[in-house]
Amino acid sequence: MKESLEGKRILIIGQVWPESRSSAAGKRMLQLLDCFRQWGMDIYFGSTAHKSAYSDDLSMYDVQEVTLWLNDQRSDEVIATLNPQVVMYDRFMMEEQFGWRVTEQCPQAMTILDTEDLHFLRYAREEMIKKGEKDVNPFLYSVRAKRELASIMRCDLSLLISKYEYDLLTHKFKIPASILYYLPFMEERVSRESVEQWLPFDRREGFVFIGNFIHEPNYQTVLKLKKEIWPLLRKKLPKVSMHIYGAYPTQKVLQLHNENERFLIHGRADDALEVIAQAKVMLAPIPFGAGIKGKFIDAIHVGTPSVVSSVGVESMKRDLAWGGFVTDEVSTFVENAIALYTDAALWKEKQLLGVSVLNDQFDQSYYSSDYKNVLTTIFINLQSHRQDNFLCEVFKHQSAQSTKYMGLWIEEKNKS
C-alpha cells in the first residue's frame, strides 16, 4: 500500500504569525494549513515573532504552536523534540536561519520552501524603477538572488505562486523543474448563486484600492494614483471618490488623505471583501512587485472589475482575458477606468470574465489534490529524489553554509 502523509508531523517555520486579515501572504498560509489538516497531518507552527492583535487563531486548523528563537540552541531542542517528517519554511530567510538546524536535527525530514513570491525579482524591479531603467535583467543578478536561489536549491521542493516565476527559474536560472511546484492561490469556484448575490452596478459607488502598507509596492501604487491618475479622473468624474484601504498605514500614507479631492485613506478594513464589494471598480497601477495579488482574487470573488498594470497581473492573465483592463499608460488607464465606471454593460461583461479567470486558473479542488500527490511522491521516494538532484545536496554541505556559521557565531556572542 502506498504510504500517505496522514499522521505525519509537519513543522512550519514562519517569519511571522499568519494574519489573513492583513495580507495575501497570511491567506496563502491558511490555505496551506487547511490542506495539511484535510490530509490528516499533525501540524506544528513555529515562529520567532511576537503575535499581534490580528494574528489568526491557528487552533481552527488543528495547529499546535511552538516558540522558536533566532541564533539560539533552544531552537535545536524544539526541532529535535518534535522530530518532524516534513518541514516547511514560509520565506527563504527562514530557511537561511533554520535550514541547517533542521538538517542536523532531522536530516531525513522532507523540506519545503514556500517562496511567497520571488523576493529578488520584486527588489530587482524596484531598483529598475528607482534608477529609471526599462530592462530588469541587469538587476536580477544580485546578492539577494544568490541567497534566494541557494535556499531553493537546498530544499526538496519549492512552491511558486506565479507561473511567470516558475518559468523564470527553470528557463533563465536553470533550476531543475523536479524541485519546483507551481501552486497558486487555491480558491473556491465562484458559483452562479454567488454571482446573483453580488451588489449590482447601480448600487455601487467609488473606486477602491487595498493593500498592506508594509509592502512597498502598495505605497508606490497609492502614490501613483494620487499624483498621476486621480487628478485626471477627478476632472471627468468629479463626484466620485477614491477609497484607499490597507493594514499598517504609516504617516506618509495617511498624509495623502484629502477630502476635498475625494481621495480617502481609510486604513485597515475590518472586512476587505465588504469594502471591495461596495466599490464599482478597483484601480491598481502597481509599478513593481512579484507573485499573485490577493486583492485581485478578492475583487473577482465579489464581482468588482479592475484596471491594473501589466506587472500586477503577469501571473494571472492568460491570453487576452482579464476581468477589467490591463495597461501601463496613464492616459489609457484613466480612459479604461471611466469606461468601466460609466458603462453598465461593459462592467458586467468584465465582471463575468473575471469569474472565468478565477474558476479556470485557481481551482481549489484540483490544486489541493495535485499538491498532495506531488508531496506524497517525493516523501516516499525522498532518498532517490535527493540522489536525482544531488547538486541540491552540495548546497547543503558545510563548506557552503555561511549562514550556519554566522548563526553559531551570533549564538556564542549572545552568551557572553
Image (cartoon, rainbow, N blue to C red):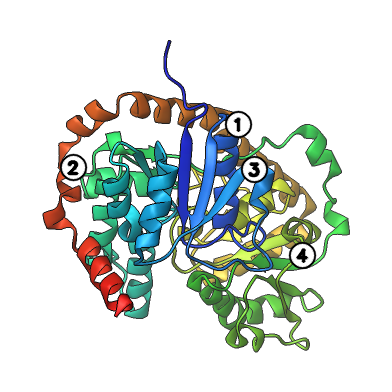
Spatial CA distance of label 4 from label 2 is 46 Å
Mark 2: secondary structure: helix
Q: CA distance from mark 2 to mark 3?
A: 33 Å
Residue at label 2? 393
Could you tell whether 322 is left or right of 299 in the image? left
Q: Which residue is mark 3?
A: 61
- Give the alpha-carbon distance from disc 4 to disc 3, as whole Å: 22 Å
Q: Residues within 10 Å of mark 2 (few under 14, many from 20)?
A: some
Against 244, residue 298 (above or below) is: above
**Above or below, 153 relative to 308:** above
Please tell me how crowded label 1 is: few (under 14), some (14-19), or many (20+) other residues with Cα within 10 Å: few
Q: Is residue 113 visible?
A: no
Rounded to the nearest angstrom, the CA distance separating label 1 from label 4 is 28 Å
**113 sits to left or right of 146:** right
Mark 2 or 3, nearer chain start: 3
Along the line of sight, which residue is nearer the eye, 280 or 21? 21
- Residue identified by numbered label 4: 270
Tag 2 or tag 4, which sits nearer the N-term? 4
Q: How far from the left and from the top, in percent, is residue 333? A: 58, 66
User: Amino acid under label 2?
Assistant: Glu
Residue located beneath label 1 in the image: 38
Q: Amino acid at mark 4?
A: Asp
Q: Quadrant of the C terminus?
A: bottom left
